[in-house]
Amino acid sequence: MSNENFKELYVGELKDLYSAENQLVKALPKMAKVAFSEELRAGFEAHLEQTKGHVQRLETIFESLNESPKGKKCAAMEGLVEEGSGAAEEDFDDAVLDAALIGAAQRVEHYEIAAYGTVCEFAKVLGETKHASLLEKTLQEEKQTDEKLTKLAKEINVQANEARSPKELDEAKPGRRAPKHAA
Ligand code: FE
Ligand code: FE
């Protein structure tokens, strides 16, 4: 078959995405758990549910291809998740932590947007129109998630810049022990 190699490339990229989405199913609850903003936490939880749907759509595609979705590990997503959890472990104040989490989450969404854009176009060329429409749905959800994160970042970054944490304010009250950095 003349397009055998291109189809193999397509299947390989889908496997990579299957690994990436499954890594996110594990990472998103952790991000939701540490998020300070209620809205951000709810956003991570909502995207977790969407992400489970992304896994299912890929499974539907693999069933129709009669192929296993397993066998690849997405090293890029592993790195993005690792960097994100590194940010979560830093000793940031509440809104600063959230700003870092949003930055990590948007890197993830941008990776997914690139990857789904690629496989969606591959599917079209291969004549896999049902795959293309499933992949397009996921692509749109990733884009919407990225836009929501951008909106949220606009509020949270301002808070991160101006707010002192309640702990810091509490410590600064008269009669309280002064914060360590106060001279
Ligand atoms: Fe996804
Ligand atoms: Fe996503």
Image (tube, rainbow, N blue to C red):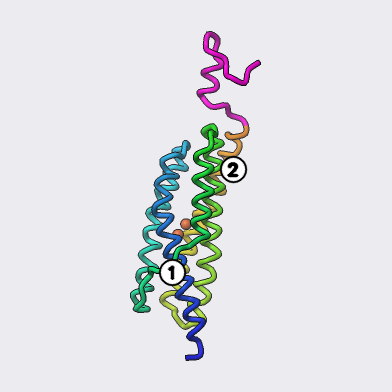
Does the Cβ of the disc 1 residue fall within 8 Å of ligand 1? Answer: no
Q: Secondary structure at mark 2?
A: helix
Query: x%, y% of residue 163?
Result: 58, 29
Which residue is more in the foreground, 104 or 144?
A: 104
Which residue lies at the image location 51% right of the left edge and 23% below the top edge? 167
Circle 1 residues within 10 Å: few <14, some 14–19, many ≥20: many
Q: What is the number of callouts on the image? A: 2
Farthest-out residue, bottom: 1
Q: Which residue is mark 1?
A: 15
Query: x%, y% of residue 24?
Result: 43, 55
Which residue lies at the image location 52% right of the left edge and 47% below the top edge? 84
Query: x%, y% of residue 96?
Result: 56, 36
- Mark carried by residue 183: none
Magenta-span inclusion, residue 94:
no
Which residue is more in the foreground, 81 or 58?
A: 81
Q: Which residues are magenta?
A: 162-183
Residue type marked 2: Lys
Query: x%, y% of residue 147?
Result: 54, 53
Find the distance from the CA under tag 2 to the CA under tag 1: 35 Å
Asked whether disc 2 touches disc 1, contact meaning CB atoms under 8 Å apart, the reply is no
Which residue lies at the image location 50% right of the left edge and 77% below the top edge? 9
Farthest-out residue, top: 175
The vertical placement of 33 against 16, above or below, is: above
Magenta-span inclusion, residue 172:
yes
Which residue is more in the foreground, 158 or 116?
A: 116
Q: Magenta region's main secondary structure? A: loop
Which residue lies at the image location 54% right of the left edge and 48% below the top edge? 83
Which residue is more in the foreground, 155 or 31?
A: 31
Residue type marked 1: Lys
Q: Which residue is mark 2?
A: 154
